[in-house]
Amino acid sequence: MQYPEKLNLAFLPTPIYPLPKLSEKYGKEIYIKRDDLTGVETSGNKIRKLEYSLAEALREGADLVITCGGIQSNHCRATAYAAARLSLKCCLLLRGNEAGEPREGNYFLDKLVGADIVIRDPAVFNGHANELMEAIAETYRAQGYHPYIIPMGASNGIGTFGYIHCMEEILAQEQAMGLNFDTLVDAVGSGGTYAGLYAGAQLLSAGKRIVGFNVCDTAEQFRQEITEILRETAGYLDCAPFDPAGIEIIDGYVGRGYALNRPEELAALTEFARMEGVVLDPVYTGKAYFGMIHELEKGTFADSRRILFLHTGGLYGLFPKEDEFGF
């Protein structure tokens, strides 16, 4: 099956290796795939999607990309740096307050690379990001630019191919390692990574259980959003619709809300760093990990023998949270 053309921006394949202490603690074979190592400035899962989104932008003659996210968005940071590599101007629409928001971490990196930044209060941003980006695009068009809009997290039909390709990568690594992962676990923040893994599993007849933990909104909202992303993806392939019946999103671990943490989440993240020498981020992988270990204790993964946890990155978002750890 022919996929859309892509760029080569990420450092791939990313490694997979076992987590022996965590495995012993929970009586399962648990491995980690380090998609936080896809780059430095472009680290994390977003760059896989951007390889396809930005290739489409260049095919369409764009000289400016516009995208959106939270004030500490990993996706926005990765987009800004990928755009710089491709000599594209970049504008970021960020959700936050003009005053009082932490300006270190990803926000600082956005400024460092020279991205244009528009900040909108959550009351204005939420539910209206696409319209706001379109209005920004009109302003740039009036200046002679040819903008290309990338939705939050690059979570749309074209971006999904980044994680269809990742599923191919996982299957090749399984073969090389002589392993089979029956269950994959990842954080769900905009739906595109999960959609790609899910679509890849169906296209490649991988026979895997894909479990997502939503870090915002609700599981039902994400089931609907992922179903729509899968519909768009099928359109690029001109293939039969994907069956959404197996979409599995586990709710209950949003906690205080998106990018907000409870002490018990940060304690779990700290314990994991000291146990396995791996740093998770507080917004995405930390919450997914917190959810996974609690569901392991509850027996949700009783039928899973070998689990692969997808580390989707986000290190820079950790630094604005330093005071919350209380060290």
Image: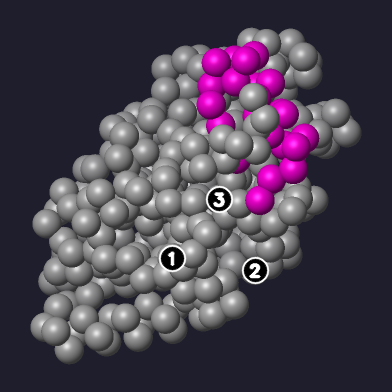
Residue ID at (43%, 33%): 36
Instruction: Look at the picture and state if 56 lies above or below 296.
Output: below
Question: How many residues crowd mark 3 within 10 Å: few (<14), some (14–19), many (20+)?
Answer: many
**Residue in the image at 26% along x and 72% along y:** 148
Q: Nearer the viewer, mark 1 or mark 3?
A: 1
Give percent across and percent down for residue 180.
Answer: 58, 24
* Picture mark count: 3
**Among the two numbered marks 2 and 1 on one chain, the one whose residue lies closer to the N terminus:** 1
Please give the label number shown on residue 194.
3
Q: What segment is highlighted magenta in the picture?
A: 260-282
The residue drawn where x is 57% and y is 55% is 189
Q: CA distance from mark 1 to mark 3?
A: 23 Å
CA gap between label 2 and label 1 equals 24 Å
- Amino acid carrying label 1: it is Leu
Residue under pointer 1: 94
Q: Position of residue 240 (x, y in %)?
A: 49, 66
Q: Is residue 177 above or below residue 220?
A: above
Q: Nearer the viewer, residue 282 or 227?
A: 282
Residue 224: mark: 2
Side (left or right) of 326 relative to 9: right
